[in-house]
Amino acid sequence: MRIGNWQFTPGFWPSLVALVLLPLFIKLGFWQLDRAHQKEQQYQQVVHRHQEPASSLNSQDMFRADKSDLLWRKVSARGRYAHEQFVLDNQVVNGEPGYFVLTPFHLAGTDKWVLVNRGWVPAGDDRSRLPDINVPAEDMDVSGEISDVPPTGLFLENAPVETMSGAVYRIQRVDIDKIAGLIRHDLLPFVVELTPAAEHGYVREWRLPGSGKERNLGYAFQWFAFAVTLVIIYLVVNLKRIR
């Protein structure tokens, strides 16, 4: 094909590479767009769930529901806190290191327990000192939102549970099964984030997780950019000036 003073003479190998890679790049780009759409739909479900009235966590129906269907629902519960408390290490708020205070809560009228994240406390300069935390001993009503276990940074896979006092333990990550074994009670597979207005809590700045679609949109842009770049390179390689 001749275009002015240029002759387009595609070679076998460049054409083969282009025929293989170009559809692949385009397919990967649309796949990432589809993933972004799926994440946006899931996020809208979370937002809708978060706006629904609170459900009672003492209900047997809540125990039978799948955890993925419960996340970010508002709940209320009646019961009593355990004496044991767990402080999750390496939690940073406003640039200051500290702990999340996680206290098992017995759901009245059932044999179930749930971990309640009562908020953040500063660690202080001396890590050997116990954070200024306390736990009420009477029956009470609590309210909050169901969430997954708090994320943690780097940690040793078999990091031991440190005993800071007779009833306060420092942990590097939340392992529901390990904590259930320590308190010798059956724990539900999620955490309740105590609402900021509730009593007996600490610093609570809970936020709904984002959809995460931005990352997939960025990946889609990269794949489509690769496809455009491949086309440009293919044309440049196979165009020759006629002298």
Image (tube, grey):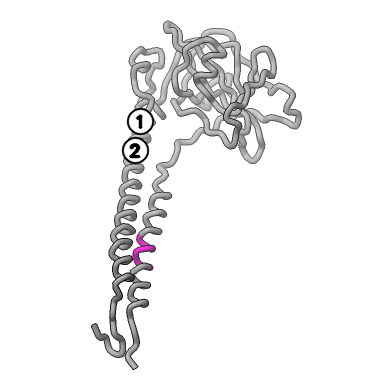
Q: How far across and how far down the image is residue 209, in percent? A: 45, 38
Q: Nearer the viewer, residue 151 or 235?
A: 235
Q: Which residues are magenta?
A: 224-229
Marks 1/2: CA distance?
A: 11 Å
Is 91 positioned to the left or the right of 23 in the image?
A: right
Of badges 1 and 2, the one in the foreground is 2
Residue drawn at (37%, 39%) of the image = 43
Above or below: residue 72 compared with residue 236: above
Residue drawn at (56%, 22%) of the image = 102
Q: Which residue carries the number 2 mark? A: 42
Q: Which residue carries the number 1 mark? A: 49
Q: Amino acid at mark 1?
A: Arg
- Quadrant in which the C terminus appears: bottom left
Question: Could you tell me what secondary structure mostly forms the magenta stretch?
Answer: helix
Q: How far across and how far down the image is residue 157, in percent? A: 57, 30
Q: Residue furthest top?
A: 109
Considering only order in the chain, which callout, 2 or 1, is on the residue closer to the N terminus?
Answer: 2
